[in-house]
Image: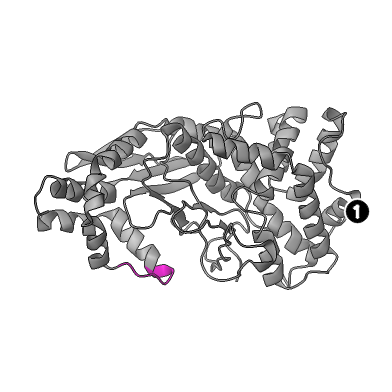
């Protein structure tokens, strides 16, 4: 049974979550084992190794389509689906659950009792049914009565107008631009297929569901997320989907070697690639559309780049040299490097950006599916452009082990 390349990080209750899937690209017909979520507050050595994967997203975001015909389908006077043509970038947006929930909230806000037809519309919506299926799949069944109780809280009715404004704002986002940014950092013709659901729901989390079969990006409607931030995060998530298709896991017989295990987790550098793609280029700050706090956190973490390289180098060396061998122990350590946007992000972004600046985007795309080669190409690029030696380097003994013939 292979792992579905899903990397997880989770924040404490009440704060948004984001979903990633980078490792062990899925192959048709394979079963999926999901690594465990790791809390931001947990120390690296104490991370769990159980159940399902969620990649935290700071709110909700919509999906995109470029160079294809788009059809709006109206339901109840509100466009509920955005359907693309059958192209390498087929993405569909479904808002029927949010539309139905808003109709109920607005009926309550007007002082009336929502008619049964509105409740039936909600329960029959594609978004609601997909959400219910996902909750059941992770062992947390969602009952219709509990959901009705959530929508019946007075505070939800008072939020109807701001939620409506958020959904309308997201519908006017530059969807084609977000997809174009993702595709600019993928090999030409890489397919991106997904259904994006905008959801009004009790839990303030967003996640990917069934990434290996029928990818769904399920997004919590968050009024705190600006349209520009939404477009950035959308490009990030779409790049992940494309990355899993462009860089399929290699078929291999027998038990994985220590080098195989290290290479497997290096796929998490895809987080940094997605940061570069979502920003739109090496000269644009990865958090140009984020809050000042988020931008300051990123800048602070980049200031500790040497430490982050050192931690990852030590991890890779421990794995390839056989000091850490149990898959659960390897996963526990690897998962700790996600954090909010930890070393997988900052180191991955630094390597990708440096290669593009030194050698061009084509050079970056040429090694993006082979993380060990990406690391060596980064070292070479850094040596050419970083005369002050401010950029950390990977050690030659590590690179030799990672790139030696099998």
Q: Taking 150 as reference, is 116 left or right?
A: left
* Residue 61 locus on image (x, y percent): 42, 42
* Residue 148 locus on image (x, y percent): 22, 61
In the picture shown, does residue 244 fall above or below 65?
A: below
Q: At 64% across and 60% down in the image, what residue appears?
A: 335
Q: At 43% across and 46% down in the image, what residue appears?
A: 59
Q: Nearer the viewer, residue 67 or 219?
A: 219
Q: At 61% across and 28% down in the image, what residue appears?
A: 284
Circle 1 residue: 397
Q: Which residues are magenta?
A: 136-142
Element under disc 1: helix
Is 135 magenta? The answer is no
Q: At 63% across and 49% down in the image, what residue appears?
A: 247
* Residue 22 locus on image (x, y percent): 60, 53
Q: Note whether residue 188 is visible.
A: no
* Residue 262 locus on image (x, y percent): 75, 60
In which image quadrant can residue 398 be found?
A: bottom right
Q: Note whether residue 338 is visible.
A: yes
In which image quadrant can residue 33 be found?
A: bottom right
In the picture shown, does residue 310 fall above or below 260?
A: above
Colour convention of the picture: one colour
């Amino acid at each position: 049974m292979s792992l579905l390349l899903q990397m997880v990080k989770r924040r404490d209750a009440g704060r948004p979550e984001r979903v990633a899937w980078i490792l062990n690209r899925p192959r048709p017909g394979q079963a999926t084992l999901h690594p465990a979520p790791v809390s931001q507050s947990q120390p690296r050595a104490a991370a769990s190794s159980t159940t399902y994967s969620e990649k935290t997203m700071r709110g909700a975001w919509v999906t995109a389509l470029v160079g294809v015909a788009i059809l709006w389908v109206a339901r109840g006077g509100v466009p509920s689906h955005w359907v693309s043509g059958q192209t390498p970038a087929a993405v569909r947006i479904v808002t029927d659950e949010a539309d139905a929930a808003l109709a109920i909230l607005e009926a309550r806000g007007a002082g009336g009792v929502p008619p049964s037809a509105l409740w039936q519309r909600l329960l029959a919506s594609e978004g609601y049914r997909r959400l219910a299926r996902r909750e059941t799949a992770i062992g947390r069944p969602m009952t219709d009565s509990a959901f009705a109780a959530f929508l019946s809280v007075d505070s939800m009715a008072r939020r109807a107008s701001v939620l409506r404004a958020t959904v309308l704002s997201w519908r006017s986002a530059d969807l084609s631009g977000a997809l174009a940014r993702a595709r600019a950092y993928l090999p030409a013709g890489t397919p991106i297929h997904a259904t994006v659901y905008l959801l009004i729901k009790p839990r303030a989390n967003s996640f990917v569901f069934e990434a290996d079969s029928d990818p769904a990006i399920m997004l919590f409607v968050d009024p705190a997320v600006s349209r520009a931030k939404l477009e950035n995060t959308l490009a990030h998530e779409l790049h992940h989907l494309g990355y899993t298709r462009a860089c399929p896991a290699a078929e291999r017989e027998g038990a994985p070697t220590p080098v195989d295990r290290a290479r497997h987790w290096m796929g998490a550098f895809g987080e940094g690639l997605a940061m570069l793609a979502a920003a739109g280029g090496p000269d644009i700050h990865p958090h140009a559309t984020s809050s000042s706090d988020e931008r300051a956190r990123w800048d602070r973490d980049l200031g500790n780049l040497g430490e982050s390289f050192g931690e990852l180098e030590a991890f890779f060396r421990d794995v390839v040299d056989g000091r850490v061998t149990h898959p659960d122990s390897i996963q526990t350590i690897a998962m700790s490097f996600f954090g909010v946007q930890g070393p997988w992000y900052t180191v991955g972004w630094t390597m990708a950006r440096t290669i593009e600046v030194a050698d061009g985007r084509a050079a970056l795309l040429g090694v993006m599916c082979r993380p060990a080669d990406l690391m060596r190409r980064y070292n070479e690029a850094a040596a050419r452009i970083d005369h002050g030696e401010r950029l950390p380097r990977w050690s030659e003994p590590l690179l030799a082990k990672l790139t030696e013939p099998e």
